[in-house]
Amino acid sequence: MKPSALRSLVATPAVIALAAAGTLAAGVNTPARAATCGGYVGLTFDDGPSGNTPALLNSLKQNGLRATTFNEGQYAAAYPAQVKAEVAAGMWVGNHSYTHPHLTQQTQATIDSEISRTQQAVAAAGGGTPKLFRPPYGETNATVKAVEAKYGLKEIIWDVDSQDWNGASTDAIVQAAARLTNGQIILMHDWPANTVAAIPRIAQGLAARNLCAGMISPQTGRAVAPG
């Protein structure tokens, strides 16, 4: 625990003992949290839910992090229990299309189907009605945007690409997260083992910079304090 955090506590023997215990336990997976939130960043995980989702959620919870999961409709339909688990773990669930096609190469009717079916699948699985949409591959155009607007969705791309989808090492994913600044969003994915392994160090790095994991505003598309 940082000295500044200790100064903010009442210096009773019990509090001092607890603080000391927390300091000693820091090396054994104690969640890293910023003493104050000097800003917020958006942690996002695409392509779930999957059989890997429980491990991802456990690591996020253990490290005091919340995130936005951009779910594919086909997987939300196949793994409804994992959608419920995402919500129970404090995550926000977004729409990432139904089958992950290149939407800019599709007709408006197909785009509409991809988005609307995912809205329904996520809601049916207990994830609520998504307010955020991430187009597959970050590919968008006027037609995609028009369909998003029809369903009241805010399009969310990213500021930092972790490259976890491209075989990035755990170190590289941690280094990518270290580039985040207030309001920015990082792209990660539900399935890479290296991403789950990076989460404790991502939490420590954010805490060291007084940044907290926030929600993504449906109004601005930027990371903000959780509502």
Image (cartoon, helix red, strand yellow):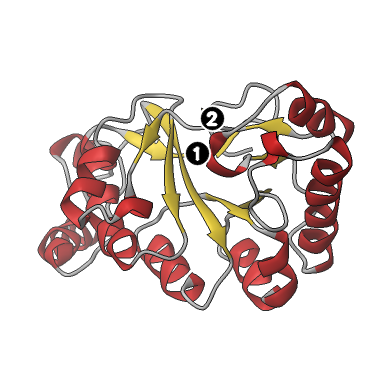
Front in this rendered view, residue 52 or 143 = 143
Which quadrant of the rendered structure holds the C terminus? top right
Rendered position, 78 above or below 92: below
Residue for badge 2: 224
Determine the secondary structure under disc 1.
Answer: loop
Residue lying at 33% horizontally and 43% vertically, measured from the top left: 162
Residue lying at 60% horizontally and 64% vertically, measured from the top left: 86
Left or right of residue 91, residue 97 in this image: right
User: For the residue marked with disc 1, what is the amino acid?
Assistant: Gly
Front in this rendered view, residue 81 or 18 = 81
Q: Residues within 10 Å of mark 2 (few under 14, many from 20)?
A: many
User: For the residue marked with disc 2, what is the amino acid?
Assistant: Val
Residue 200 appears in view: yes
Q: Earlier in the sequence, mark 2 or mark 1?
A: 1
Residue lying at 62% horizontally and 73% vertically, measured from the top left: 82
Determine the secondary structure under disc 2.
Answer: strand
Corner quadrant of residue 72: bottom right
User: Label 1 near label 2: C-beta < 8 Å?
Assistant: yes
Left or right of residue 87, residue 37 in this image: left
Residue lying at 33% horizontally and 45% vertically, measured from the top left: 163
Query: x, y (%) of residue 52?
Result: 46, 74
Residue for badge 1: 214
Residue 129 appears in view: no
Query: x, y (%) of residue 71?
Result: 63, 57
